[in-house]
Amino acid sequence: MGLKAKIFGEGEGYDYSTLCMPSLPWSKKRHPVNFYPLDEPLPLLLSLVMGLQHAFAMVGGLITPPYVVAKFSIDEFPFANVELQQYAIVAALITSGICTCINVLRFEIPFSKKLFGRNLYIGTGLLSVMGTSFTFLPIFEIAIRQMKADGIEGTDAYGKMLGTSMLCAVLEIIFSLFPGKYIQKMFPPVVSAVTVTLIGVALTGTGMKYWGGGVVCAEMIWKEHSQVVDLVGNVVSGVPSAACTGNGKVVLPYGSAEYIGLGFSVLCFLVAIELFGSVFMKNCNVILALLFGYMIAGVSNYGPEGLAYVDTQKISDAPAINFLWTQWFGIGIYAPAIIPMLIAYIVTTVESIGDITATHEVSELRTDTKDYTQRIQGGLMADAICSILASLFTSMPNTTFSQNNGVIAMTKCASRRAGLATGFWLILMGVLAKIAGIITSIPDCVLGGMTIFLFSNVLVSGITLFGSLNMKSRRTRFISALSLAVGVGVTIWPFAFQDMRASSYTAAFWECADCSEAMKGFRNGVSIFLSTGYCIGSVIAIILNLILPQDPEDIMPDGDDVEKKSLEDTLAPMAKDEPGEAKAETSSEEEGIVTEHVEESIA
């Protein structure tokens, strides 16, 4: 193979025009796309192009949790520690790049055969990328807020959460050692559906706060209420403020039309990309729409003074190059967050199993083989190890990213080389710190227009999982309804159990202003658990799944007993049978039942 072939590839399988050709809406003509399997030796240029698409598809999601925590939780009002915010982005990008490479390469654990009787791995060996997990965002926010209310500095509080994350990641290591069949029994599809849906509900609400101007001003908007102003005047402390300060030099109340309009420009561009964009543009639509909204904000000004929505000083102040450990956080443990963090790792275990299964399917690999089970084990181990590494790298926990399965499905590229290229681009973006400077200068309202769409995709994934369940089953409906009732309820209104911002230990459920320090810590742990919708909702779903009996057999009018089949019974073939044979037997049995009833009706 010559140098040209190594860089560009040879043959019809490497057609770059297909990736970049714009699409015409409502056109019946579609461009054919070649499929590149797992071990396809992609040429260098195509590897970099495919990797860049994955990096663009995930960069908006992986930088959001650390940026939000650094800006709104670690930092103090008026959130002016730009250096901290930029470092959080740098650390997240570099960490995600390193963890992606680990997961794609897959390493065998030495002596695992002798110790456990089977080979164990770190990594899936698939085009399965890793990034900062949204699952831990609500816990980090609530726990850091509670620690700061107790007088702990924001950076020290973040360090305690990093140490707590490292400790709790051991749970996922234990899960990765279990045989696959036991994991599937512990976390059946109904639990996965409930968990993912509740995460989507929580995050979508957070995105709406950004869209209106910012999280803090959204939660403090009650200060602008006419009854408050008329009755008590301005004696209420202005910190935290009801005015949104994260939009350049423009300071307006939450929900101002200017903020809503800028965020809406992002959503409009998303629709335009879906109508006219090429395959490449559709795969990185989130980051492109964010940049479009950023451009609109950059050319817009407010008022006769010409106040700017984009603070370019943040870009100027950013260093040219940055790396890990340029900011210091003392590692510690925050005991009240241990139980919620353990639950979060259970949640990520459920998510990762689904993500890896989806990656298998879009990579056109079978999911009824020993190789699939080994990749599940390796993926869970990689989640745990990379979450520990992430804490050492001063970043939040890393897990598999589900949205990149859509990139594989659209580009038809499942090659591992594209995954390694993704890791390369992420590390490069992190090292070039000016990129972090650009991201931190994006107005909160523009970021909200992007995040509300990005977060709602998590919600849609949960709804999709419900669509694969047998919702005619009374047992499944009961588990889903009860767990969602509590989970969605506390997500929409967490202040039944959680203290309102700047009002610590005052929630009527458990007022604890005069409690001892030990009791305050225990009370905070209970508060985090009860006010985090996917924590309490997932636990309820797991418990109900364990204690509720299976549905009884349906008694048909003619006296025939027709047993209901659960999702697991319908989808999982017997180990000794081929999938096709199992499906054929099931179809034949069902056809016989239908035919029998039709003949009786005719008679």
Image (tube, rainbow, N blue to C red):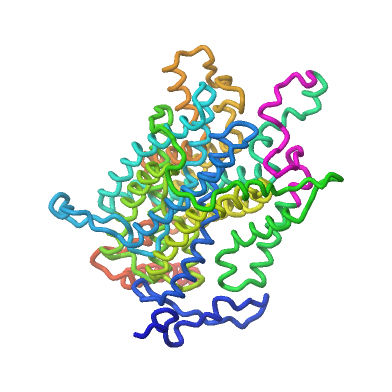
Report if residue 412 is visible in the image: yes
The residue depicted at 42 percent of the width and 84 percent of the height is 4
The residue depicted at 47 percent of the width and 19 percent of the height is 520
Please state which of residues 380 and 265 is positioned toward the viewer in this rendering: 265
The residue depicted at 44 percent of the width and 44 percent of the height is 395
- Number of marks in the rendered image: 0
Is residue 235 found inside the magenta-colored segment of the image?
yes
Where is 547 relative to 272, above or below? above
The residue depicted at 23 percent of the width and 66 percent of the height is 576
Q: Position of residue 222 (x, y in %)?
A: 72, 29
Is residue 215 found inside the magenta-colored segment of the image?
no
- Position of the N terminus, as image quadrant, is bottom left
Please state which of residues 597 and 516 is positioned toward the viewer in this rendering: 516
Q: Position of residue 368 (x, y in %)?
A: 31, 65
Q: Position of residue 587 (x, y in %)?
A: 39, 70
Where is 136 relative to 572, above or below? above
Q: Which quadrant of the view contains residue 593?
A: bottom left
Q: Which quadrant of the view contains residue 205?
A: top right
**What span is in magenta?**
232-261
Q: Horizontally, is 475 left or right of 71 in the view?
A: left
Q: Horizontally, is 72 left or right of 42 in the view?
A: right
